[in-house]
Amino acid sequence: MIYCFFYSGEEKLDCLSVSFAPVRTEVELLNRKFWDTLVTTLQRSIINDIEIIDKFATEAMATLRMQPQSVEEIGLANQKHVFYSEKCPEMLQIFENADKKNKILSAWTKEQMEQVERVTATWDNFQSLMDNHELIISKQVDSIKSNLNTQVKNVNGEIDKFKMRWDQMKPKEEALEGDQSKIAQGELKAHFIYTPKKPLYFDCTTEIKDRYIKAIFILGITFIKEKRAEWLLIMKSKEKIVEDCSHFGIKEPSFPKLDEVEADLTKHEEMWGLFEEFNSSLRSMSKEEWIIFRSKSYRFEEFLTSWYEKLQSSKQATTITVRLLQEIERYKTILPVLKYVRGEIFSDQHWAEMYGILGMPKKTVDKLLFEDFLKVKDRLAAKENDLQELNNRAGGEVVIRQALNELDVWEVEAKFLFVDHQTSVGETVPLIKDWKDTLNKVCQNP
């Protein structure tokens, strides 16, 4: 009854007539807004669900379509497949909810969201890739196995090339023999810095020979280090192939020349590394200031002794060990001479004379290093007598200077008592009293 009155728009009460038209209009307006808001909210909810599904499926398909080229990539692809499998129920629930919402929207508004149909096709493609994953990976594994055989051939090829270059260019012990004819023929050009304007010959001074041998050692060690770095890259590729073959159940490939190259490279590293170790320790010691090191020269003797024993106890003598033993013997010849150049009692004149004897460039004592004497070790040994004579002379001059200084001090501090003496001619002469005591004091000052 009330609804009828409400629908008719008015109601009479006695002599009054009440109109419901404004209320009815407002209610209809609110009802329309409610339905519009409900439809908009439903559409937004469908769009959000579709975006989540589309993003997940698109990214997953991009990952699943990637063809793995290694064991790591295959493992990663399988991990991703497991992850997507675990996420599928959640995504499927979102997809079903979106489809239900779309049907409700269609029942209300006679309209449907086109995005639902598009994402349905995307989801079907994703499901197809998920179902075919094992087949795709299986085919890719077969392809990788075939590729591994090619990689083995490539690595063996790299090993062969490395061996040929190594056999040709590796440092030769014969280079240390200093054959004049080989230098003239240029056979050692790769191992020695040769200046056309100033050629170095082996009939020159010992110092030039030493420079040549040292250059051979340094360049040889540098070459070995470079080749070891190159070899490590090949070994890294080899280990990767062996690991992949193990994962795929393939028999471990053969690398026929690998052990031979590794053994020869290691042999040269150990052999030539002796010089680097010796030279590095000696260089560290030689950089010490002479005024500090001269009181600790026993360290140099201990260093030479320890290395001599180490080289003598080596299982097999090589040109390297022989050269180092010869070098140690030459250094040992200067051990007894170092005491003559300590310079603790030298004056500036003595230092200048020493520089002249040894042919060393002049420098202040505080800038003098132990290596300055090592550079002239042969002259140091040859001039032992001259240096001994200089040291003895400097020591004698020190004693004389000390005596003269003490006499000067005594002269200032001495006080004499005089007594008058009458000569035979009647002159009065003052004489030092207690002369014998005074003379004894002077004699006691060396």
Image (cartoon, rainbow, N blue to C red):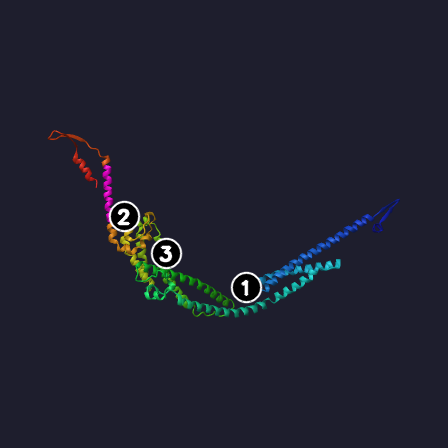
If you read the primary sequence from the N terminus, does the residue marked by circle 1 or circle 3 appear first? 1
Tell me: 183 left or right of 126: left
- Between 223 and 106, the one lying in front of the other is 223
On the image, the x and y values in percent for residue 211 come to 34, 59
| Image disc number at residue 204 | none
Asked whether the beta carbons under mark 3 and mark 2 sit within 8 Å of each other, the answer is: no
Q: Which label belongs to residue 73?
A: 1
Mark 2 sits on what residue? 350
Residue farthest toward the right in the current orientation of the protein: 15
Give percent across and percent down for residue 105: 73, 58
Between label 1 and label 2, give the one nearer the viewer: 2
Q: Is residue 29 left or right of residue 387?
A: right
Residue 313 showing in the rendered view: no
Q: Which residues are magenta?
A: 391-410
CA distance for labels 3 and 2 = 32 Å
What amino acid is at disc 2?
His
Q: Residues within 10 Å of mark 2 (few under 14, many from 20)?
A: some
Asked where in the image residue 203 lies, by quadrant, the reply is bottom left
Quadrant of the image containing the C terminus: top left
Instruction: Give the residue displayed 40% in from the left and 60% down from the top.
Output: 222
Can the viewer see residue 350? yes
In the picture of the structure, the residue carrying the numbered disc 3 is 280
Q: Residues within 10 Å of mark 3 (few under 14, many from 20)?
A: few
Q: Disc 1, disc 3: CB below 8 Å?
A: no
Label 1 and label 2: CA atoms lie apart by: 77 Å
